[in-house]
Image (cartoon, rainbow, N blue to C red):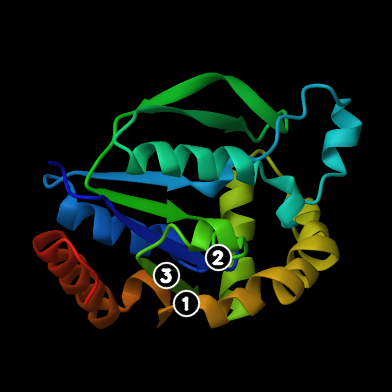
Amino acid sequence: MNKRPVVIGIAGGSCSGKTSVTRSIYEVFREHSVVVIEQDYYYKDQSHMTFEERLETNYDHPLAFDTDLLIDHVNKLLNRQAIDKPVYDYVHHTRAEEVIHVEPKDVIIVEGILVLEDERLRELMDIKLFVDTDPDLRIIRRIQRDIKERGRTADSVIEQYLTAVRPMHNMFIEPTKRYADVIIPEGGDNGVAIDLMVTKIKTILETDSIV
């Protein structure tokens, strides 16, 4: 009988280094069997809205995400069932037509700014991490990322940060830190914290129980 997969939640502010932490853990367990479920892929479909209306969406608010679908997909992976992970089109601000087929794995990493916000999702996690990085570094990273990867201008990124990202971080993201089992300062640069997490995950996989 297959063991229950290990579910790891990795939360933190926008551009805090969640992806670096996720990648570090993924590389260790890649050959073992690991899958990454990015909360960013689960933004709600907005195809019924005009492009102008989509631009007004607050993407840092919990209601921007299709959390029910995310929870359903994590539950299916826990039951060793495959899923079709949605893809989000950041240029057109709506869900893309294509999906990504994902087979169940032994380690499931759920990564995103608000993955610790919903109690139902937290209850599925064996380990909950919060990546904590200074705001000035996060905004610089966000400007660089959104210009390069999402077709944004610097002015639009800064305006969004001041009007939505920062207040939503303070209101919804920062408070979820209290649910974390471990807080990781400076993200992927914190090798000690990542090594501790890797050891913990290996222990769970080997013993089939939380210790």
Secondary element type, mark 1: loop
Q: Which mark is residue 133?
A: none
The quadrant of the picture occupied by the N terminus is top left
Q: Are marks 2 and 3 in contact (CB under 8 Å)?
A: yes
Residue type at numbered disc 1: Ala
The quadrant of the picture occupied by the C terminus is bottom left
Residue of label 2: 116
Secondary element type, mark 3: strand
Residue type at numbered disc 2: Leu
Residue of label 3: 128
Residue type at numbered disc 3: Lys
Q: Would you place residue 196 above or below residue 19 in this image?
A: below
Upstream in sequence: badge 2 or badge 1? 2
Q: Are marks 1 and 3 in contact (CB under 8 Å)?
A: yes
Whole-number angstrom distance, CA of label 2 to CA of label 3:
8 Å
How many marks are shown on the rendered structure? 3
Residue of label 1: 180
User: Is disc 2 surrounded by few (<14), some (14 to 19) or many (20+) residues within 10 Å?
Assistant: many
Q: Residue at x 52, y 56 (%)?
A: 121
Q: Position of residue 50 (x, y in %)?
A: 89, 25
Q: Are marks 2 and 1 in contact (CB under 8 Å)?
A: yes
Q: Position of residue 196 (x, y in %)?
A: 22, 78
In this rendering, would 12 be left or right of 205? right
User: Is disc 3 surrounded by few (<14), some (14 to 19) or many (20+) residues within 10 Å?
Assistant: many
Whole-number angstrom distance, CA of label 2 to CA of label 1:
8 Å
Secondary element type, mark 2: loop
Q: Residue at x 64, y 68 (%)?
A: 139
Residue closer to the observer: 115 or 152: 115
Whole-number angstrom distance, CA of label 1 to CA of label 3:
5 Å
Q: Residue at x 36, y 46 (%)?
A: 36
